[in-house]
Image (cartoon, rainbow, N blue to C red):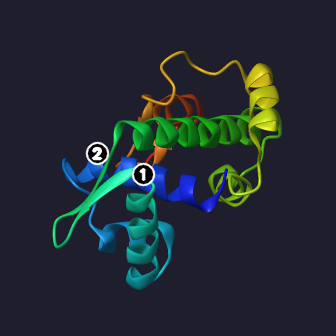
Amino acid sequence: MNTADQYLKAVFLVQQIEDGPASTGALADRLGVSPASANEMVGKLAEKDLLVHEKYKGATLTDAGEERARDALATYCVLERFLANVLDVEDYRGEAGQLEAVIDETVADRLDMIIDREPDCPDCFDAEADACSHLVEQLGEVGAGD
């Protein structure tokens, strides 16, 4: 997954939380980057027709952008579940966040075969909790987004 896909995933999740366009400030906060960096990448993604950006309103994914965002989110979910269920990594979210930038589709597909992903993935991802709802239930976590 590349940086563009990470931004698309963030736009997708922020749109769910804000129930509308994703503000560049919210994207910057979610990704841990400066608002200027978020604004620059939003512009690049708009040039590629992956999102529409309205100044002072925010970014909204196009159909192509949403498809890529959902694929990126599914890859992230695969990583989380593999790290938590197979490798028993305590900080599986942090590790998944670091790995998502370098994992390719082939590796993600092979990990997916191991973990037996839920059929509703990535719709099972709770944007506000920032976690897969199935994984939170399975591990009995409280305050997953904290």
Identified at 47% across, 50% down, the residue is 9
Tag nearer the camera, 2 or 1: 2
Q: Give the distance between the C-alpha atoms of the residues marked 2 and 1, in whole angstroms.
A: 18 Å
67 relative to 119, above or below: below
| Image quadrant in which the C terminus is located | bottom left
Residue beneath disc 1: 143
Point out which mark residue 104 bears. Answer: none
Residue 17's spot in the image, x, y percent? 27, 50
How many numbered badges does the structure rendering display? 2
Q: Look at the image and tell me whether residue 4 can be seen.
A: yes
Can you tell which quarter of the image residue 75 is in? top right
Identified at 57% across, 28% down, the residue is 138
Residue 136's spot in the image, x, y percent? 51, 37
Asked whether, in this view, residue 29 is left or right of residue 114, the answer is left
| SS category of the residue bearing label 2 | helix
Query: Pointers 2 and 1 in contact (CB under 8 A)?
Result: no
What kind of residue is marked 1?
Gly
| SS category of the residue bearing label 1 | loop
Residue beneath disc 2: 16
Residue 70's spot in the image, x, y percent? 48, 36
Identified at 46% across, 33% down, the residue is 133
Q: Look at the image and tell me whether residue 144 can be seen.
A: no
In this rendered view, identify the residue nearer to me: 82 or 2: 2
What kind of residue is marked 2?
Gln
Asked whether, in this view, residue 93 is left or right of residue 39, the answer is right
- Who comes first in sequence, dot 2 or dot 1? 2
